[in-house]
Image (cartoon, grey):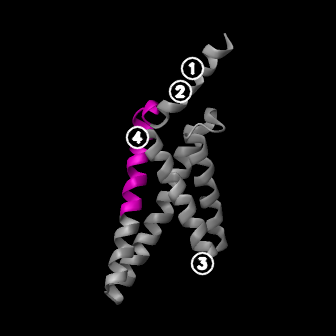
């Protein structure tokens, strides 16, 4: 269950970055982390490319973390200039996203099984089916 949660976090991040671009609130360059996050989610769900899932998951988590930290700092600065309820919610949202990706990186670097247990299980099942 927790492995699907990690994939869902990547999927949500990908949709978030792409929706920001589509709404005209961010630069078109944000499509890149959006697509990388969606591809990572697909790999973590085990649909495609499970062999490279951990490598892409860690790289994409770092990419998302850098972007979220940048957005968090910008939100805090704007919150200092003009405090308001909307600014507080935006700041809290970026803070939660940052904490999620820090946790994913800690899980990914501690043991690869933490990040990709379902992927390892599916590869073992494929080997059994071939024999």
Q: Residue at x 40, y 40 (%)?
A: 2
Q: Are marks 2 and 1 in contact (CB under 8 Å)?
A: yes
Q: Is 66 above or below relative to 70? A: above
- Residue 2 — which label? 4
Q: Is residue 111 left or right of residue 80?
A: right
Q: Earlier in the sequence, mark 2 or mark 3?
A: 3
| Closer mark to the observer between disc 4 and disc 2 | 4
Alpha-carbon distance for marks 4 and 1? 19 Å
SS at badge 3: loop
Q: Quadrant of the N terminus?
A: top left
Q: Nearer the viewer, residue 73 or 52?
A: 52
**Of the pair 17 and 112, the residue shown nearer to us:** 17
Above or below, 1 relative to 82: above
Circle 4 SS class: helix
Could you tell me residue 40's position as x and y percent?
Answer: 59, 47
Sequence-first disc among 4 and 2: 4
The 10 Å Cα crowd at callout 2, few under 14, some 14 to 19, many 20 or more, is: some
Mark linked to residue 120 = 2
Quick one: label 1, few (<14), some, or many (20+) residues within 10 Å? few
Question: Magenta segment: does it hold 100?
Answer: yes
| Res 93 → quadrant | bottom left
Q: In the rendered image of this protein, does residue 94 appear above or below residue 24? A: above
Mark 4 vs mark 3: which is more N-terminal?
A: 4
- What is the chief secondary structure element of the magenta stretch? helix
Residue 124, label in figure: 1
In the rendered image, which residue does mark 3 sit on? Answer: 23
Label 2: element kind: helix
Residue stretch in magenta: 96-114
Image coordinates of residue 117 in percent, x first then y, are 47, 31
Mark 2–mark 3 Cα distance, whole angstroms, equals 38 Å
């Amino acid at each position: 269950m927790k492995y699907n949660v990690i994939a869902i976090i990547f999927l949500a991040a990908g949709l978030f970055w792409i929706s920001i671009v589509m709404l005209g609130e961010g630069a078109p360059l944000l499509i890149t982390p959006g697509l990388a996050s969606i591809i990572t989610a697909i790999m973590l769900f085990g649909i495609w490319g499970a062999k490279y899932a951990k490598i892409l998951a860690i790289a994409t988590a770092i990419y998302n973390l850098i972007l979220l930290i940048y957005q968090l700092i910008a939100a805090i600065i704007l919150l200092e200039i003009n405090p308001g309820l909307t600014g507080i919610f935006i700041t809290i949202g970026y803070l939660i996203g940052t904490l999620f990706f820090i946790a994913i990186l800690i899980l990914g670097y501690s043991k690869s099984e933490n990040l990709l247990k379902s992927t390892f299980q599916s590869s073992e099942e494929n080997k059994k089916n071939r024999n």
